[in-house]
Image: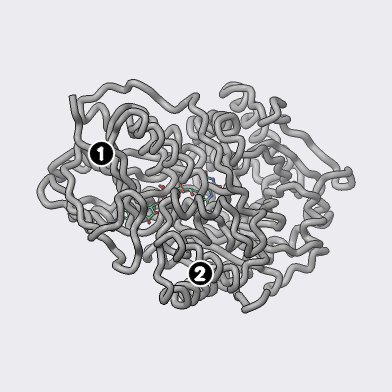
């Protein structure tokens, strides 16, 4: 029996993972994004594939178990992107935080506003549970077949451990987690896999970037958001207007879920209550030296967790957690947030002498969290929910919440729910399906010489604008060598492949450079 395509709104990690899961189940898919793929939170996260150690304090055991299970899968299925990471937790005392942790666990809110740092014993209990759940989930093997090492306790003077400030830490706990350097590439890999699967089984699979959807009865009208762009390769460039009567719609637009429903338009209660989170990247050599190539998971003075992570030859520091009601696309790191993160580094690594001028770039994203009346943003659940819209003339579900880590399990759950609603059986899942390896090694792209991989990206990876290539295919904004000349070379390559007119090169470079400056704090020069 033929079925109409399922329309997925949103090309972040969740939309892409669901697209692949539905194609695996023999259902045609159209995926549409009002901007580029991975334009939202997916590109602004801490890039950890983790169980979420601190969720244990809030009693979120099933979320931690699910996340650890997915961590094990991603390590195995996407070893080109997901790597084991050892994280060190500096502990300041023995028993600190015990009462508070127990209070949070029992759902009690203490009266005291005083920050109490989690001590050695509290962290030990958390790590014991974490290790226990990892083993229950499945013994985790890294790419080379070795099992991820369990927790270990270290003295500050041991070799190979981060050289943290002895005034604020007495010992270090170490534990295993994983890091996905480029979730942007996982989005592309999911969609590339979906495209191959669809081709092999003759399914209709289309990706529309820079397009919007409007619901007219049970028909969806699709039109371009951007008359300048040349459109993505599927569909072929044209006037960009399409209509479809989808069998179901999946609203996977992250922090935009409410505004997407309003624009379709469909009535809905408020679903989202996002918080913004900022990071900065520094290439400061002394800080890297003090970190000893390891990750650190520490606490700010207000008790908020902050990560210092090895990333692209530098150190990624974040994050903040601030309620945010504006347009997620406009969220940028403020001076105040950067000062806050710098103060955490100064506290734990005073010897680095990190200054504002050492920040190479910053980024900010909005977490797609469910709307709740929580006083503490950190306490809002990171668990996802599927919310059906009863006012829609066809099955329409919104994905609320979630993490990078659980994108595959969320996709499996969503696909099963949608298949059920459209009367189709679940015939497959992605639990054991390797995620195809991409040839790209973005951190190594340091010269203006254009590699075949870049051309391949322009031709096959739904690139429309120069920014798509720079920020979400090659991730050159994390490169200290990024120059205006490199932008110009890439713009010429876009011209060669029909994505840009020659007369548009200069405006495209200027627009891209301006966004790098305003959005990421990156100042290009003509010749650096
Ligand atoms: C600061 C921060 C740190 C994080 N750290 C981690 C971490 O370390 N580990 C982890 O597992 N998770 C982490 N997360 C969470 C994770 O990044 C998100 O849960 C995940 O990326 C959400 O993906 P998504 O596909 O649902 O949404 P998004 O990635 O936000 O994608 C939504 C897409 O929808 C598009 N869109 C918007 N409106 C429309 C519309 N009307 N029609 C069509 N398309 C539309 C947007 O352009 C965008 O491309 C973090 C998040 C943040 C913000």
Residue placed most toward the observer, 345 or 18: 18
Residue at label 1? 6
Mark 1 or 2: in front is 1
Q: Residue furthest front?
A: 496
Q: Position of residue 131 (x, y in %)?
A: 65, 29
Q: In the orientation shown, which residue stands out farthest toward the left?
A: 217
Question: Which quarter of the image is occupied by the N terminus?
Answer: top left
The residue to which callout 2 is attached is 519
For residue 348, what is the image quadrant? bottom right
Q: Residues within 10 Å of mark 2 (few under 14, many from 20)?
A: some
Q: How many numbered dots are placed on residues in this image? A: 2
Q: Height in image: 520 above or below 97?
A: below
Residue under the point 54% across and 71% down? 488
| Mark 1 lies within 8 Å of ligand 1 (Cβ measured) | no
Q: Position of residue 96 (x, y in %)?
A: 70, 46
Helix, strand or loop status at disc 2: helix
The colour scheme used to paint the residues is one colour
Q: Quadrant of the C terminus?
A: bottom right
């Amino acid at each position: 029996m033929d079925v109409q395509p399922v329309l997925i709104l949103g090309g972040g990690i969740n939309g892409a993972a669901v697209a692949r899961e539905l194609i695996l189940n023999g259902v045609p898919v159209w995926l549409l994004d009002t901007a580029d793929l991975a334009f939202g939170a997916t590109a602004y996260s801490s890039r950890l594939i983790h169980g979420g150690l601190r969720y244990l304090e809030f009693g979120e055991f099933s979320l931690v178990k699910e996340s650890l299970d997915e961590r094990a899968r991603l390590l195995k299925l996407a070893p080109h992107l997901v790597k084991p990471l050892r994280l060190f937790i500096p502990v300041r005392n023995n028993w600190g935080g015990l009462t508070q942790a127990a209070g949070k666990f029992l759902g009690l809110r203490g009266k005291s506003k005083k920050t109490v740092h989690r001590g050695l014993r509290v962290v030990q209990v958390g790590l014991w549970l974490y290790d226990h759940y990892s083993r229950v989930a499945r013994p985790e093997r890294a790419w080379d077949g070795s099992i991820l090492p369990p927790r270990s306790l270290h003295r500050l003077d041991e070799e190979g451990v981060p050289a943290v400030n002895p005034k604020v830490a007495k010992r270090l706990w170490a534990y295993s987690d994983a890091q996905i350097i480029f979730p942007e590439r996982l989005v592309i890999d999911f969609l590339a896999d979906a495209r191959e699967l669809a081709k092999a089984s003759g399914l209709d699979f289309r990706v529309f970037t820079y397009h919007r959807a409007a619901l007219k009865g049970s028909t969806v009208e699709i039109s371009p958001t951007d008359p300048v762009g040349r459109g993505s390769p599927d569909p072929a460039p044209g006037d960009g207007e399409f209509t479809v009567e989808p069998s179901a719609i999946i609203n996977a637009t992250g922090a935009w879920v409410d505004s997407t429903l309003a624009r379709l338009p469909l009535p809905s209660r408020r679903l989202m209550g996002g918080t913004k989170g900022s990071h900065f990247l520094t290439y400061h050599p002394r800080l890297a030296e003090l970190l000893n190539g390891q990750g650190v998971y520490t606490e700010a003075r207000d008790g908020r967790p902050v990560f210092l992570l090895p990333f692209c030859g530098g150190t990624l520091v974040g994050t903040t957690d601030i309620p945010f009601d504006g347009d997620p696309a406009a969220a940028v790191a403020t001076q105040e947030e950067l000062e806050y993160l710098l103060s955490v580094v100064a506290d734990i690594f005073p010897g680095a002498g990190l200054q504002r001028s050492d920040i190479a770039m910053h980024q900010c994203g909005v977490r797609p969290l469910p709307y709740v009346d929580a006083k503490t943003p950190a306490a809002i659940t990171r668990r996802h929910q599927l919310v059906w819209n009863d006012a829609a003339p066809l099955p329409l579900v919104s994905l609320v919440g979630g993490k990078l880590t659980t994108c595959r399990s969320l996709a499996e759950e969503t696909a099963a729910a949608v298949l059920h609603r459209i009367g189709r059986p679940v015939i497959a899942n992605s639990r054991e399906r390797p995620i195809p390896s991409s040839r790209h090694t973005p951190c190594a792209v340091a010269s203006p010489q254009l590699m075949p991989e870049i051309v391949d990206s322009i031709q096959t990876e739904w690139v429309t604008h120069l920014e798509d290539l720079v920020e979400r295919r090659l991730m050159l904004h994390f490169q200290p060598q990024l120059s205006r000349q490199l932008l110009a070379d890439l713009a010429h390559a876009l011209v060669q492949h029909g994505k840009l007119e020659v007369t548009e090169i200069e405006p495209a470079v200027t627009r891209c450079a301006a966004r790098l400056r305003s959005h990421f704090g990156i100042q290009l020069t003509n010749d650096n």
